[in-house]
């Protein structure tokens, strides 16, 4: 309900998608395929495009993201792109997730670090 | 690179079938784009990848967001979008039935504006700090009389306190009872200027720093060196056009030249404190003899506490000093104490209780408005059952329905709140002159951030209170029933809830009516109470003679005699005389020294007034024994009945002699006993008074003129008489005795008026509430009534049926209200006089009035029920 909102807790896939947007929004290229590729390239998870869009939509409805629609390009068979960017709430949620992770991992950097 | 750049057509066709329009472009476009890069490396893996992605998409495509009006938040829709959808919907619904919206918004606006207006007064008077630097450290200092009242200071005590007390940064004094008036002379026309003489350090204590020049220096506080003046900003602007070169110029007050040494900024003039609400300041210059006087209490004290000292410490220190002084000067100080009162309390005084009471009362009005609006929303909710049922059938959860109705209520409250603030602003603006005479610090009343916040909180509170119950009830309604009924009369749904609202409204109205009734009675009791004189048709005006023009008593006596003689000759004048201080104006309070009696150990003080022949007749103060003073007398006095008993006991005072120590200590013969008069105020009992007549009057007198014509018609001729004798003599405080009495009753009148308005609104709202509920019930039971009529029920039976239906919640409400008003009587007990706050007669009267109004409100629907045509009603089935 609009007057009662649970404290935002991000699922791990949500975190990946938000981080993807964060990485890409600077170059104005945070759209589904680019995010999917970014996640694939960095985390090794080959996720489906529908999962990315479902999550993007959910994050948008939670107020973490905003979106706009770009112009059609011939490369895409004349279809349009939907771009995303972080809202302050999204940044805050990411920050919170990051804080939780680093706080829990604090002191175990050497054991957890990959060689 | 030929065919390979194109993705498989079948896959794309499947995707466009499966995906919703919303997502089609983006998903397919993305896949196509990535396919292009992938197939550039290896066409086969590109195909494989595309098919793999397609299958996953077909299995679970991105969801289409559900319609926000039908579903709750569980489906993950945006909260903001939900809210806006609700607001849009509210707006649509309201514009479809504007009369409903107008009714609700205006009821709310009325209640919220009243609350906002009263709160902004409370805010300015009670909550906001005084406009001084660090106002919480400023205190006023009074002496405490043996009977515990606060009283002015005497210079002797003041200087002892100032010397010995360490709790204060500084302590200063100024003459009591408002600024003095001096005549601005040498400019041709008579003009009075208000002046406050202040002692050393006054400006430092209030932290007033001159914008031009300087404040007074130590040596200027001695007689002879005191012809210097500091101008207020207002006076500087009006008299000198804010010219910066005024310092060093001289101006004449009472024919004596004063040098301008400084100009104060505008914020040094605080209207609610008499010491700063004046045109100019001069040094208070006392002779050594005056400085030592301990018995003459005519000064006010102000002090600033040191930073690390709190009020209780300062009080304890002052009490200790006072106790020591009482031992040191048993004759003058024994039994007397000291009061240290925070500045805020000294200025606001008992207005605080009155304002908080009014805030409470206006809060009740808000509750009644909430009940009424709740009622309206509830009716509407019932009329919309079908709509709600359809939405539920389409999948809207109970929570979602509640949320939407709740949003409606809040939106209405917000509209009411916005309108209410506007209304409050307009009301306060147009009532500003009225307010100025009713409450202290009136000039500071404004709608600031705190008031706006209050209005917002009140609006939200109102919306929640009025919206919750109807929304909950509507959300609960049975889907099946609502759809089945096909929209016809939902007979008795929610009648219980609405009866409860009626009970609340009636109970709250009764409390308000009771308060208003008691207040009005108190006001009447004070107004019509016997003050000891007859205030009708009496005109008064004051003059203060310039000492340099009338240096000798004989000259002053000649002036007053001439004026009185000529006034008596005016047409319509029945009697005229003078007195130094009118009743309700503070005046001299002294102890008598009787000739031929041993001095009393602890003599009580009497009010001492200087009069001339004609005063008694002008005021119609009864002569009980002996005779009035006449022109041929010199040094005689009249005593009031209480004063005679106080000093002479059972002896007859007539013919005996007594002296008043403050004026000249001549012995004056008592020639008559007169009725007692309420000198201090209308509330306290009359005070023992002596009136003396001397041929050597001071320079100050108030003419008291009894007329047979309306007193206002005599203002012009009487002032003309004074100016015919002295062109430059200012005449001030021109008013009738009735105005003086009204001036005494401002706060009572103010609260009675506002409570009356609130009670009227409450009564109206309650009547409307009863009417609407009963109409609703009658409509619901029309079939039953029709059958009864068809079976031969008489008109009286039907009438009784409806009226009883309407009246029983009213009676329950009256009982509840009676209990509540008896419980709350304590709150206004301190504000009413001459009547008990739980006066049974008033209670009975307002209960009867409320019952009568409720009866009238229920008669209209009852009459409608009576006229129901049984044939039509039954055929409508």
Image (spheres, coloured by chain):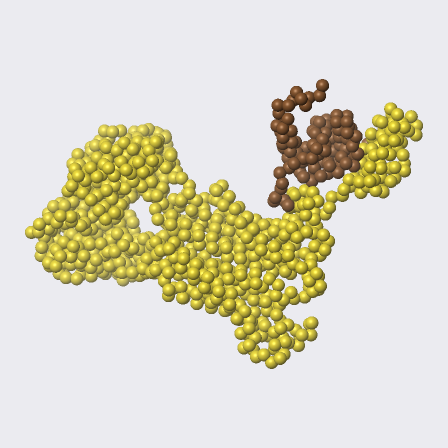
Q: Which residue is drawn at 36% across and 45% down?
A: B348
Horizontal and vertical percent position of residue B386: 69, 59
The quarter of the picture where the C terminus of chain B appears is bottom right
Q: Which residue is drawn at 47% across and 59% down?
A: B508
Answer with the quarter of the image where residue B629 lies: bottom left
Horizontal and vertical percent position of residue A23: 71, 27
Above or below B514: residue B460: above
The extreme front residue here reads A111
Q: Is residue B191 visible?
A: yes
Q: A115 or B124, which is in the foreground?
A: A115
Answer with the quarter of the image where residue B256 lies: top left
Q: Residue at x 64, y 55 (%)?
A: B475
Query: Which chain is displayed in yellow in the rendered image?
Result: B
Above or below B208: residue B425: below
The extreme left residue here reads B596
Q: B704 or B146, which is in the foreground?
A: B146
Q: Which residue is drawn at 72% across and 28% down?
A: A24
Q: Is residue B564 left or right of residue B204?
A: left
Q: B364 or B235, which is in the foreground?
A: B364
Q: In this view, does B65 lie to the left or right of B566?
A: right
Answer with the quarter of the image where residue B486 lies: bottom right
Q: A98 or B1, which is in the foreground?
A: A98
Please tell me the colour of chain A: brown
Horizontal and vertical percent position of residue B133: 38, 34
Q: Can residue A38 be seen in this view?
A: no
The extreme bottom residue here reads B792
Q: In this view, does B346 lie to the left or right of B472?
A: left
Q: How many marks overall?
A: 0
Q: In this view, does B864 lie to the left or right of B613?
A: right
């Amino acid at each position: 309900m609009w007057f009662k909102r649970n404290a935002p807790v991000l699922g791990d896939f949500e975190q990946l998608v938000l981080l993807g947007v964060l990485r890409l929004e600077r170059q104005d290229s945070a759209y589904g395929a680019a995010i999917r590729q970014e996640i694939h390239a960095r985390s090794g998870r080959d996720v489906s495009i529908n999962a990315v869009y479902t999550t993007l939509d959910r994050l948008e409805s939670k107020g973490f993201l905003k979106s706009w629609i770009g112009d059609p390009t011939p490369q895409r068979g004349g279809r349009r792109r939907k771009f995303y960017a972080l809202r302050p709430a999204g940044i805050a949620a990411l920050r919170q997730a990051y804080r939780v992770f680093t706080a829990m991992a604090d002191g175990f950097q050497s054991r957890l670090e990959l060689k | 690179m030929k065919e390979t750049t194109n993705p498989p057509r079948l896959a794309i066709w499947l995707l466009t079938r499966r995906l919703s329009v919303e997502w089609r472009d983006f998903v397919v476009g993305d896949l196509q784009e990535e396919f292009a890069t992938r197939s550039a490396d290896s066409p086969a893996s590109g195909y494989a990848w595309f098919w793999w992605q397609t299958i996953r998409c077909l299995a679970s495509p991105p969801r289409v967001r559900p319609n926000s009006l039908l579903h709750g938040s569980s489906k993950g829709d945006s909260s903001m979008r939900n809210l806006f959808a609700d607001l849009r919907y509210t707006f649509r619904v309201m514009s479809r039935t504007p009369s409903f919206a107008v009714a609700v918004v205006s009821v709310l606006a009325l209640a919220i504006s009243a609350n906002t207006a009263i709160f902004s007064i409370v805010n300015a008077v009670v909550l906001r700090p005084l406009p001084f630097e660090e106002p919480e450290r400023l205190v006023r200092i009074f002496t405490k009389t043996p009977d515990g009242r606060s009283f002015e200071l005497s210079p002797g005590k003041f200087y002892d306190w100032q010397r010995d007390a360490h709790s204060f940064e500084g302590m200063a004094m100024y003459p009591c009872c408002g600024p003095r008036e001096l005549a601005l002379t040498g400019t041709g026309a008579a003009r009075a200027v208000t002046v406050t003489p202040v002692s050393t350090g006054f400006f430092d204590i209030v932290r007033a720093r001159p914008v031009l020049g300087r404040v007074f220096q130590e040596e200027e506080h001695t007689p002879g060196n005191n012809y210097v003046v500091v101008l207020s900003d207002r006076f500087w602007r009006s008299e000198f056009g804010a010219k910066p070169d005024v310092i060093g110029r001289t101006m004449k007050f009472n024919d004596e030249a004063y040098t301008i040494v400084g100009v104060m900024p505008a914020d040094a003039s605080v209207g609610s404190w008499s010491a700063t609400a004046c045109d100019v300041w001069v040094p208070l210059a006392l002779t050594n003899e005056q400085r030592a006087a301990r018995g003459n209490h005519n000064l006010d004290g102000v002090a600033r506490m040191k930073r690390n000292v709190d009020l209780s410490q300062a009080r304890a220190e002052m009490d200790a000093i006072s106790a020591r002084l009482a031992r040191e000067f048993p004759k003058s100080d024994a039994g007397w104490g000291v009061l240290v009162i925070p500045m805020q309390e000294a200025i606001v005084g008992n207005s605080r209780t009155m304002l908080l009471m009014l805030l409470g009362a206006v809060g009740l009005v808000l509750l009644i408005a909430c009940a009424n609006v709740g009622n309206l929303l509830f009716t509407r909710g019932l009329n919309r059952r079908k709509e709600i049922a359809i939405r539920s059938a389409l999948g809207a959860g109970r929570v979602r329905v509640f949320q939407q109705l709740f949003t409606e209520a809040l939106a209405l409250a917000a509209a009411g709140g916005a309108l209410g603030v506007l209304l409050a602003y307009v009301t306060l603006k147009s009532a500003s002159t009225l307010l100025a005479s009713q409450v202290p610090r009136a000039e500071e009343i404004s709608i600031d951030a705190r008031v706006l916040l209050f209005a917002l909180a009140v609006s939200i509170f109102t919306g929640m209170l009025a919206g919750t119950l109807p929304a909950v009830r509507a959300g609960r309604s049975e889907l099946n029933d609502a759809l089945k009924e096909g929209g016809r009369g939902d007979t008795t749904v929610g009648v219980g809830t609405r009866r409860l609202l009626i009970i609340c409204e009636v109970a709250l109205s009764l409390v308000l009516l009771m308060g208003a009734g008691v207040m009005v009675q108190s006001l009447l009791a004070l107004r019509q109470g016997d003050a000891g004189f007859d205030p009708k048709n009496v005109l008064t005006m004051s003059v203060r003679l310039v000492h340099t023009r009338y240096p000798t008593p004989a000259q002053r006596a000649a002036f007053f005699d001439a004026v009185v003689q000529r006034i008596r000759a005016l047409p319509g004048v029945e009697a005229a005389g003078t007195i130094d201080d009118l009743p309700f104006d503070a005046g001299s309070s002294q102890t008598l020294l009787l000739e031929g009696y041993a001095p009393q150990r602890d003599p009580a003080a009497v009010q001492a007034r200087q009069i001339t022949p004609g005063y008694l007749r002008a005021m119609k103060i009864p002569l009980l024994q002996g005779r009035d003073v006449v022109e041929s007398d010199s040094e005689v006095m009249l005593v009031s009945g209480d004063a005679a008993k106080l000093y002479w006991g059972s002896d007859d005072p007539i013919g005996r002699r007594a002296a008043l120590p403050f004026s000249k200590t001549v012995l004056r013969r008592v020639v008559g006993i007169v009725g007692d008069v309420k000198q201090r105020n209308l509330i306290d009992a009359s005070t023992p008074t002596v009136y003396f007549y001397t041929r050597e009057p001071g320079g100050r007198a108030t003419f008291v003129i009894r007329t047979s014509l309306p007193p206002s018609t005599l203002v012009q001729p009487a002032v003309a008489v004074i100016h015919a004798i002295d062109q430059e003599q200012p005449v001030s405080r021109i008013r009738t005795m009735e105005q003086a009495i009204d001036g005494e009753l401002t706060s009572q009148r103010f609260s009675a008026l506002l409570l009356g308005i609130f009670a009227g609104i409450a009564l109206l709202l309650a009547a409307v509430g009863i009417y609407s509920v009963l109409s609703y019930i009658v409509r619901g039971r029309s079939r039953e009534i029709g059958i009864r009529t068809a079976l031969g029920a008489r008109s009286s039976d039907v009438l009784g049926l409806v009226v009883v239906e309407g009246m029983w919640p009213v009676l329950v409400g009256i009982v509840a209200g009676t209990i509540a008003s008896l419980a709350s009587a304590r709150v206004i007990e301190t504000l009413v006089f001459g009547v008990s706050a739980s006066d049974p007669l008033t209670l009975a009267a307002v209960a009867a009035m409320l019952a009568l109004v409720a009866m009238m409100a229920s008669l209209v629907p009852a009459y409608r029920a009576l006229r129901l045509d049984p044939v039509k009603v039954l055929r409508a089935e």
